Image (cartoon, grey):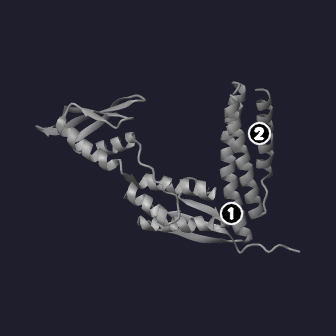
Amino acid sequence: MTTKQPAQLGQVIWWTLKNVRVSVTDLRRHLAACGLPEKYAREPRSRNAFIRAARAMEEDRIMRRVSESKETVVYQFTSEFLSKSKLQYAYEAQISLDKKSGLISTDNPKIKAKLQELYAISCNMLRTKDIRNIVKRVFKNEAEDLLPLRRNGAVYFVPRKWEAVVDKVQAFLAKVGVPLETLVVPNQTEARGTVHRAFEAEALTVLDDLEAEVKEMIKEGGEKRSLKVRMGRVKKLKDRGTIYHEMTRLLSKQMDGRLFRLEKQLKKALAST
């Protein structure tokens, strides 16, 4: 008896994020309302919030990093002004952040007051890049797959089994004013070939990196923990290969052979550590 094939392989999705700003509080509320965990809306790291606040004060001044360590980061403000048809520069202030405590220090009280105000706002504000990363984390954790169809991302294929996740993300982005566009991919020969080629291109790039990493690790006598991490990545890639093979009914012999050899190398290296 022939098993009936599903009418669609999945969906192509894409979105355009531009000049988006949403508070962490609102974003968590939107996620919860769409059935997604609030944990995805993380507060910005203190360093990022500090730099964003400082950038907001950059008009008519130059901002340059002076130094950075694990504990602190220091920038300098230099004012830029026109005098007698010539650009002039004058030291204005050094500003520093204690990354752990979030304490801001500076030798200019006027700048400190404004910087602290902007820093407080930045600590509770997520922007375009943050939202983009949230969407990618949701698909990575909730759907386990987001296949790029373009080299620079922005357009992705999501297998049919994760349709419910697409609906949740679509509802979430709508709440922040960003439409998630979708296009159903029919279960047809041409479509299966396109999806297979996209997966193979991405998988072979990942495999290239994995092979290089493992080669270097074996050469230097890699730690057992690091080798196990790479073995986990090989397994994940094999599992994804199985999913796409079943979906497209096309097999990547080149990838399967390389994965087999890489897995064998890792098992041998693990046995000797």
Q: Nearer the viewer, residue 101 or 92?
A: 101
Q: Residues within 10 Å of mark 1 (few under 14, many from 20)?
A: few
Q: Is residue 126 above or below residue 186?
A: above
Identify the residue shown where x is 76% and y is 35%: 266
Q: Are marks 2 and 1 in contact (CB under 8 Å)?
A: no
Q: Residues within 10 Å of mark 2 (few under 14, many from 20)?
A: many
Residue 269 coordinates in the image, percent (x, y): 77, 30
Tell me if 141 is positioned left or right of 41 in this view: right
Taking the image as drawn, is residue 19 in sight? no
Tell me if 146 is positioned left or right of 95 in this view: right
Q: Nearer the viewer, residue 203 or 228?
A: 228
Q: Earlier in the sequence, mark 2 or mark 1?
A: 1
Question: Residue 96 shows which numbered tag?
Answer: none
Residue 7 coordinates in the image, percent (x, y): 71, 75
Q: Quadrant of residue 226?
A: top right
Q: Is residue 28 above or below residue 47?
A: below
Q: Amino acid at mark 2?
A: Leu
Q: Which residue is mark 1?
A: 194
Identify the residue shown where x is 89% and y is 74%: 1
Residue 60 coordinates in the image, percent (x, y): 21, 43
Q: Which residue is mark 2?
A: 262
Residue 51 coordinates in the image, percent (x, y): 34, 41
Identify the residue shown where x is 77% and y is 72%: 5
Q: Amino acid at mark 1?
A: Thr
The residue positioned farthest toward the left in the image shown: 84
Taking the image as drawn, is residue 126 in sight? yes
Q: Is residue 57 above or below residue 252?
A: above
Q: Nearer the viewer, residue 203 or 80?
A: 203
Q: Give the distance between the C-alpha atoms of the residues marked 2 and 1, in whole angstroms.
A: 27 Å
Quarter of the image that includes the C terminus: top right
